[in-house]
Image (cartoon, rainbow, N blue to C red):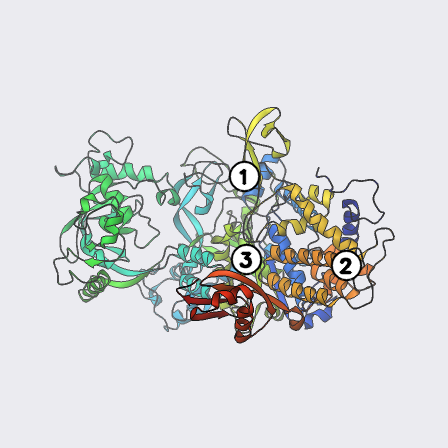
Amino acid sequence: MAKSVEPATDLPPYRYTAELANSIEEKWIERWEERRTYFTPNPVGEISEPNGELAKRPPYYVLDMFPYPSGSGLHVGHPLGYIGSDIYARYKRMDGFNVLHAMGYDAFGLPAERYAVDSGRHPDVTTRQNIANMRAQLRRIGLGHDPRRGVSTIDPEYYRWTQWIFLQIFDSWYDADRQRARPIAELVEELDAGARPWPPGSAANGRSWSALSERERRRAIDSARLAYLAEVTVNWCPALGTVLANEEVTADGRSEQGNFPVFRRPLRQWMMRITAYADRLADDLEGLEWPESLKLMQRNWIGRSFGVQLDFSVKADTEVAMPVFTTRPDTLFGVTFLAVAPEHPLLAGGLPASWTDDIPASWRGEASVPDAPDGGFASPAEAVAAYKHLTERRSDRQREGDEGPSGVFTGLWAEHPLSKEKVPVFVADYVLMQYGSGAVMGVPAHDSRDFAFARALGVPVEMVVQPPVEWLSEQGLASDAGVERWSDAYTGQGTSVGSGRDTDGLPSEEAGRAFADQLERLGLGEHQISYRLRDWLFSRQRYWGEPFPIVYDEEGDPVALPESELPVLLPELSDFSPKVSDDELAEPEPPLARLSDWVETELDLGEGKQRYRRETNTMPQWAGSCWYYLRYLDPTNSDAMVDPEVERYWMKHQGEPGGVNLYVGGVEHAVLHLLYARFWHKVLHDLGHVSSPEPFQRLFNQGYVQAAAYTDERGFYVEASEVEERDGSCFHRGQPVERSYGKMGKSLKNGISPDEIIAGYGADALRLYEMFLGPLDQDRPWETQGIAGVVRFLQRVWRYVVDEQTGEARVVDAPPPVGLRRALHRTIASVRRDIESLRLNTAIASLMEFSNELRAELGDEPPAREIAEALVRALAPFAPHLCEELWERLGHTDSVVYAPYPESDPDLAALDQVKIAVQVNGKLRAVLEVPAGAERDELEAAARAEEKVAELLAGAKLSKTIVVPGRIVNFVLDGKG
């Protein structure tokens, strides 16, 4: 238990101790709830009251990333961002805005299900208990959330609308001509009228629309939907009984949850066509107030590349054109091999029956397949089959990782489109089917992965871009060093060489354009854009998730349920554990498939009662977190996801992309949550359901709280709270342990409960200390003893206002000293600037500095009411409970929550005097105090009048005088200093 910084005896009756702080805080939490202080009104609708007059203010929406209700409760690292956003929201309320700030819970998903399985209790029970515990902990910190607006993804009235959004996506297609989603019914109407040709490459297989049967048309339309079924290669974890997203798989090919093996296999799954929005998702980042590093992460994930797609001719069973995408056409004549992904259709058949005699053993699998026979496999087919089996066990993250690339020769040769030379075709795991065409042209001299591959397998390396001398020098090479001496590829631009054409000697970029133009003229290639982004895998073989609003007819085709059937309730299931196995070939069996009475159903969907089969997969945890910010706007609306007028009020901002004004959360959600939420929002915008094209206007990533962690002799973490320090060494239950620092949490067993800190110091002290430890966007170490300084500051503020013997206010109704008033206004200006930019640690520092000035000026004398009330209002967002109590004791009956935040008078905030440095030849000779705003001539005259400076200038030849108003005067002399 944390100890209070004050002893418990011999104290004045109204000393601000931990006991009094806790009493005040409980009082004001209850009073806020009684008075419905944080009830934020909508302009219309069911929750337009109470506090309806606030809806006339400009709206401001502050949002925290959806928390996951943990079974172990909060540690002090969890509320870091919540406290920061709460301070900002309180500031904006006081500054005249109608502020929406709410908290809900992302409660479906794999962690909750596994926690329930491990504890032997139903996830509905454990998750709701966790939510109740987390809600109580957050309440005690004094967060100003509107309690009516918080939602939980597991509530049927919430996931009804998650299912409704899925149906909007399912009933839509992407019109590439108009660059937006449109209702699928409009596509059918245009096709039926002959106003639109059927898109190439569809399920229609080139046949005219009118020639298709009704069932064929239906399946063709299904293939065009934004939500569609497809057989795709997935990360299958038999030990968890479910598929996993790439981000749920560790770099060594195991599940993040449980550390189980993950395998690659094809399964029929629901997919979301997020790739249709790739350009908009990339381009629209420009208008957002997000950290540039985060924007870069999203752009890299989307992976938009501008380049050329060209065809190499490959002779297998027949001669086929194999498309290859490259962003570097300038390296085309440096191709010494092609490499295809293990899943590439070229490998499905037609491989040569045997090797030719000149094929080295390293190409036959000896260098890449651990159990290959000496000299490699007997045939290309055997080598490729063995290699494919090996790579099936590796995730995309492993294949893209730092391990050296591997591969085997397919026995096939390709013809270079321009030089007509033959190049070998390999299968290599570092080539992903999901990127480009699933094939790459290997240019080892100018691509690091290709270089490592070529060196490992003995493939030739040919330089076609001459590196600059500086690069060669950095490699320790002479300017004429051959490529055989390089230790890595040269990947930059340079001079084009080695093509045997008139492009040799040109800058490589210019040569690349010439090669690309020639490929287009010959019909062998075209300029193209490629993306790393893949469609979103949307199925999970879990119980604890949203059921799909989909049934299947007698021929196995999906049928959308009407809105009247929503929500599709998650049925009760006592055995909710997934079917787990250690067999990678085990067939998935979702827990819902065991409920035959639920799975098999009879429905009338417009054609009389028919038998249907329900979808037994559930949605991923991402689904509920994609749109919760919209439901906060109108959480009690049973007729719509959100009332359009309410949505426009909160989300549409003139001249901006719109959306949430400030979104605060961890950088770990930089890609997927934000990308998925933006995708859903854009679909809803295209369909007219929301007014803003983007969901989150401004984004701020908070850092982490770090704390000491301890490992025993086995390297296992031990409970940090049980560690004792003696004579500079650390011991756990009498045994020595090693100390390190890391992110506070369960994994390092170094969590510290906020309940413990609040009991020992008070919630306001916890709030200030978390913010004062460092910039909000950076990690900060936690040391509990450091909170004492923050407590002393709060005690000083209390004593300024309250008599510790009587408990009465001790202010005087008289003007404050002019210097103190000026200091106050400078502090207000500084604090306002810092809050707006979320530099909350420096805002607190400014308030502390002012309290020191107040003490220095007044000693034990009471402050003027003007000073006391301004200080209380300025501190209120940071320490709301204390400041509510002080505001009341100052005689106010209204809440400080809505008191105006103090304004700074520019004239009073301006400094009377400033210090400037006086230099002669750059050396400091004097420091002057001069009037703020003094002109250049005045500054120079004052500097010349300084005795020491005057002596140095006497008889010297002055070269020039440099004057920077408010900072410096420097006299530059010839030959004298």
Query: In the figure, 88 relative to 235: above or below?
Result: below
Q: Quadrant of the N terminus?
A: top right
| SS category of the residue bearing label 2 | helix
Q: Tell me the residue at 57%/26% (across/down).
A: 736
- The three-letter amino acid code for the residue at tag 3 is Phe
- The three-letter amino acid code for the residue at tag 2 is Leu
Query: Which residue is at the front of the view, 187 or 271?
Result: 271
**Which numbered mark, 2 or 3, is in the foreground of this view?**
2
Q: How crowded is the residue under tag 1: few (<14 C-alpha within 10 Å), some, or many (20+)?
A: some
Residue 667's x, y, as percent?
51, 52
Q: Which mark is residue 858?
A: 2
Distance in Å between CA atoms under marks 1 and 2: 43 Å
Toward the top, the furthest residue is 734
| SS category of the residue bearing label 3 | strand
Q: Earlier in the sequence, mark 1 or mark 2?
A: 1
Q: Which residue is mark 3?
A: 700
